[in-house]
């Protein structure tokens, strides 16, 4: 019996539309949310350990895994506060591997002009043009 299905609609221009279902048993979080939360949290762990800069971590995932955005670009877009709440919930329900990195606290992301990256210069440039 299907308990939950994530529907993915992929449009390829105006030519075709394809719909597929991913059947998922009832569990905390969606597949993409859980996997992406771990990738993003590990990116913060690597940053905290001094392994690479945010720019290089983003670049590595875009080039190496063909992601359209790096984990820091994505968390800045979604909001560090949103990612933190997701990880707190998953940590509470699923355990230690979802413990949020402490670097997630304190900044919100693009919506306030400052997340992993500083967008204040970009906002100033947009106001001028």
Image: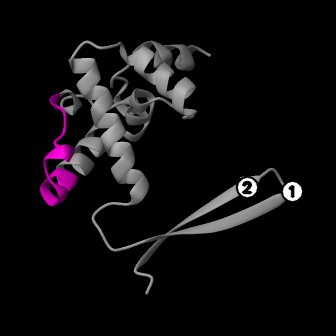
Residue 25 on image: x %, y %: 37, 73
In this view, the residue farthest toward the bottom is 1
Residue 66 on image: x %, y %: 58, 33
- Give the secondary structure at mark 1: loop
Residue drawn at x 47%, y 29% is 70
In this view, the residue farthest toward the front is 64
Look at mark 2 in the image and give the residue it sits on: 11
Q: Left or right of 32: which side holds 104? A: left
The 10 Å Cα crowd at callout 1, few under 14, some 14 to 19, many 20 or more, is few
State the image quarter where residue 47 is shown: top left
- Nearest the eye: 63 or 113: 63
Residue drawn at x 37%, y 48% is 35
Residue drawn at x 22%, y 54% is 90
Look at mark 1 in the image and give the residue it sits on: 15
Q: Left or right of 91: which side holds 119? A: right
- Give the secondary structure at mark 2: strand
Q: Which residues are magenta?
A: 89-102
Above-or-below relation of 117 to 22: above
The 10 Å Cα crowd at callout 2, few under 14, some 14 to 19, many 20 or more, is few
- Nearest the eye: 116 or 61: 61
Residue 129 on image: x %, y %: 62, 16
Above-or-below relation of 71 to 19: above
| Magenta-colored stretch includes residue 71 | no
Q: Main secondary structure of the magenta part?
A: helix
Instruction: Kindly indicate whether the residue at mark 2 contacts the one at mark 1 (C-beta within 8 angstroms).
Output: no
Q: Which mark is residue 64?
A: none
Residue drawn at x 23%, y 32% is 104
| Magenta-colored stretch includes residue 92 | yes
| The N terminus lies in quadrant | bottom left
Q: Left or right of 10: which side holds 83? A: left
State the image quarter where residue 51 is shown: top left
Q: Left or right of 91: which side holds 69? A: right
């Amino acid at each position: 019996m299907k308990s939950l299905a994530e529907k993915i609609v992929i449009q390829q221009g105006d030519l075709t539309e394809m719909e597929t279902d991913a059947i998922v048993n009832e569990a905390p979080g969606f597949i993409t949310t859980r996997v992406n939360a771990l990738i993003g949290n590990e990116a913060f762990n690597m940053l905290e350990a001094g392994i690479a800069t945010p720019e290089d971590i983003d670049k590595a995932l875009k080039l190496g895994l063909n992601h359209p955005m790096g984990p820091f670009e994505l968390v800045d877009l979604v909001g560090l506060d949103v990612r933190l709440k997701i990880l707190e919930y998953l940590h509470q329900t699923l355990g230690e591997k979802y413990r949020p990195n402490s670097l997630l606290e304190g900044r919100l992301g693009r919506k306030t002009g400052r997340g992993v990256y500083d967008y204040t210069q970009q906002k100033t440039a947009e106001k001028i043009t």
